[in-house]
Image: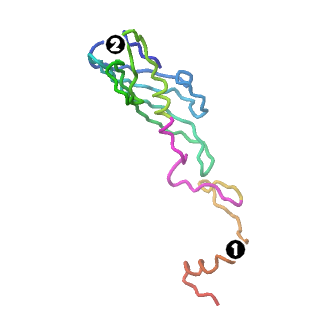
């Protein structure tokens, strides 16, 4: 996702793009839909500010029930393109140094990082997902488990009695 600086006008402008995962150098298999990008650009006399909004659908597998589901992923990023001489020694990672000879800037790393930071660590299809039965492996969202759990650990009986308020003989 390269931004051509010599084609930008002074002031505010918006660019909308449809990107494939190849355009963003993504090898993750869950990215099967295109990424829609909207770049809000403000070109001033000394610097260029780019605010990007990204939107796509991911094909994920639920960590609880192992069923596939789609997740609408929205991410945003911001970067500032600024002349080298105006930068201090503490360079921010969102500031891209440019010179008068710079014709284009690659925003791919910013977009890719923004997308990956928005992917949830725990992928769950819904908050009410019941998962799968550890005994028989049935999806508890679809069917009820008919396992007879006769292998109980006697060490837990005192705690069970606390829950049921039944004194042990």
Residue 41, relative to residue 117: is it above or below? above
Residue for point 71% across, 58% down = 136
Residue 130 highlighted magenta (yes or no): yes
Residue for point 51% across, 34% down = 57
Residue for point 51% across, 40% down = 119
On residue 8, the disc is 2
Dominant secondary structure (helix, strand or loop) of the stretch shown in magenta: loop
Residue 162 highlighted magenta (yes or no): no
Residue 8, relative to residue 33: is it above or below? above
Query: With 95 as the anchor, is 60 left or right in this view?
Result: right
Q: Nearer the viewer, residue 92 or 125?
A: 92
Stretch in magenta: 116-135
Q: In the orientation shown, which residue stands out farthest toward the bottom?
A: 169
Q: Secondary structure at mark 2?
A: loop
| Mark closest to the chain's N terminus, 2 or 1 | 2
Residue 138, image quadrant? bottom right
Query: With 135 as the anchor, is 89 left or right in this view?
Result: left
Residue 12 position within the rendered picture, expressed as x and y whole percent measured from the top left: 28, 20
Q: Please say if the residues under marks 2 and 1 sit with CB atoms less than 8 Å apart.
A: no
**Residue density around tag 1, few if under 14, some if 14–19, many if 20 or more, within 10 Å:** few
Residue 139 position within the rendered picture, expressed as x and y whole percent measured from the top left: 64, 54
| Number of callouts | 2
Residue 149, image quadrant? bottom right
Q: Secondary structure at mark 1?
A: loop
**Residue density around tag 2, few if under 14, some if 14–19, many if 20 or more, within 10 Å:** some
Q: Nearer the viewer, residue 114 or 80?
A: 80
Residue 116 position within the rendered picture, expressed as x and y whole percent measured from the top left: 51, 35
Q: Which residue is mark 1?
A: 153
Q: In the orientation shown, which residue stands out farthest toward the front?
A: 89
Residue 45 position within the rendered picture, expressed as x and y whole percent measured from the top left: 26, 16
Residue for point 68% across, 59% down = 134
């Amino acid at each position: 996702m390269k931004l051509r600086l010599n084609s930008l006008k002074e002031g505010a402008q918006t660019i909308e793009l449809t990107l494939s995962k190849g355009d963003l150098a993504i090898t993750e298999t869950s990215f099967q839909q295109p990424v829609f990008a909207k770049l809000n650009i403000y070109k001033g006399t000394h610097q260029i500010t780019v605010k990007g909004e990204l939107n796509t659908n991911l094909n994920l597998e639920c960590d609880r029930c192992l069923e596939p589901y789609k997740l609408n992923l929205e991410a945003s990023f911001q970067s500032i393109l600024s002349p080298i001489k105006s930068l201090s020694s503490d360079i921010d990672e969102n500031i891209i140094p440019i010179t008068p000879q710079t014709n284009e800037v690659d925003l791919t790393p910013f977009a890719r990082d923004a997308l990956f930071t928005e992917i949830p660590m725990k992928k769950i299809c819904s908050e009410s997902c019941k998962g799968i039965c550890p005994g028989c492996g049935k999806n508890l969202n679809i069917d009820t488990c008919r396992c007879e759990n006769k292998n109980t650990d006697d060490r837990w009986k005192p705690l069970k009695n606390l829950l049921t308020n039944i004194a042990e003989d």
